[in-house]
C-alpha cells in the first residue's frame, strides 16, 4: 500500500489562522502521511524566521471574547487603536495557560517530521518580499509545483 498524502494551502497570516495548517500537517505526518503545505499570499507570514502574528476580533464574529464581550461589546469598537494588540496578548496568555503549543513549536514539529513547506514564488515576487526573512530550506514554487503533489493527494485542504 502506498503512503497517504495530504496537501494543504495556507493563505492567512494571523495568529488564529496559523494553527490549522501546522496542527493538521504535524498530525498527518505523525500518522504517516506524506505532507506538504503551500503558503501563498498572507500565509507567507507563517514562514518568517521571526513571527509577529496577531489575532483580530474585527470581522471574526465566532471568536470567543473575554468577559463575554462578544455579548455586550459593540463590534465596531474592536477597531479602536490598541484593541488588536490587547486581544492578541489575551489570546497568547490563554493559550499558554491552557498548555497550547506555540506556532513556532508546531512549525518546528512540521520541519522535524519532514513536512515540505513551499513558499509561493509569485506572491514573494508580487510583494517584493525578502527571502532572507524566511526560514532556511524552503522550496519556492508556483501553483504548478503545488498541483504536482496535490493532484496525487488523498486529502487536499484550503485553510
Image (cartoon, rainbow, N blue to C red):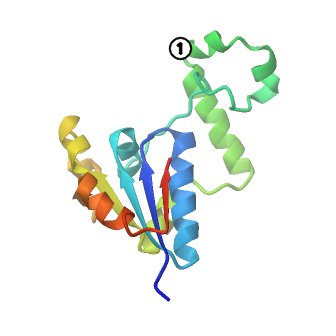
Left or right of 116 in this view: 24? right
Could you tell me residue 59's position as x and y percent? 58, 23
Helix, strand or loop at label 1? It is loop
Could you tell me residue 60's position as x and y percent? 62, 27
Could you tell me residue 35's position as x and y percent? 44, 69
Residue displayed at 62% across by 10% down? 76
Left or right of 117 in this view: 125? left
Residue displayed at 56% across by 33% down? 55
Residue displayed at 75% across by 22% down? 70
Residue displayed at 22% across by 40% down? 129
Can residue 135 be seen from the camera position used here? Answer: no
Q: Residue furthest front?
A: 151
Q: Is residue 18 above or below residue 63?
A: below
Within-10-Å neighbours for mark 1: few <14, some 14–19, many 20+: few
Q: Which residue is mark 1?
A: 81
Q: Residue furthest bottom?
A: 1
Q: Quadrant of residue 130?
A: top left
Q: Is residue 122 above or below residue 115?
A: above
Q: Nearer the viewer, residue 89 or 123?
A: 123
Can residue 61 be seen from the camera position used here? Answer: yes
Amino acid at each position: 500500500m502506498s503512503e497517504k498524502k495530504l496537501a494543504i494551502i495556507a493563505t492567512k497570516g494571523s495568529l488564529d489562522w496559523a494553527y490549522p495548517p501546522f496542527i493538521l500537517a504535524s498530525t498527518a505526518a505523525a500518522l504517516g502521511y506524506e505532507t506538504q503545505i503551500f503558503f501563498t499570499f498572507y500565509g507567507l507570514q507563517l514562514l518568517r524566521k521571526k513571527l509577529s502574528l496577531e489575532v483580530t476580533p474585527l470581522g471574526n464574529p465566532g471568536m470567543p471574547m473575554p468577559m463575554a464581550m462578544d455579548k455586550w461589546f459593540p463590534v465596531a469598537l474592536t477597531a479602536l487603536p490598541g484593541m488588536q494588540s490587547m486581544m492578541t496578548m489575551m489570546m497568547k496568555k490563554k493559550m499558554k495557560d491552557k498548555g497550547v503549543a506555540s506556532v513556532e513549536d508546531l512549525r518546528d514539529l512540521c520541519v522535524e517530521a519532514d513536512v515540505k513547506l513551499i513558499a509561493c514564488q509569485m506572491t514573494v515576487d508580487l510583494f517584493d518580499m525578502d527571502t532572507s526573512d524566511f526560514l532556511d530550506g524552503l522550496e519556492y514554487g508556483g501553483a504548478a509545483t503545488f498541483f504536482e503533489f496535490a493532484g496525487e493527494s488523498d486529502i487536499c485542504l484550503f485553510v
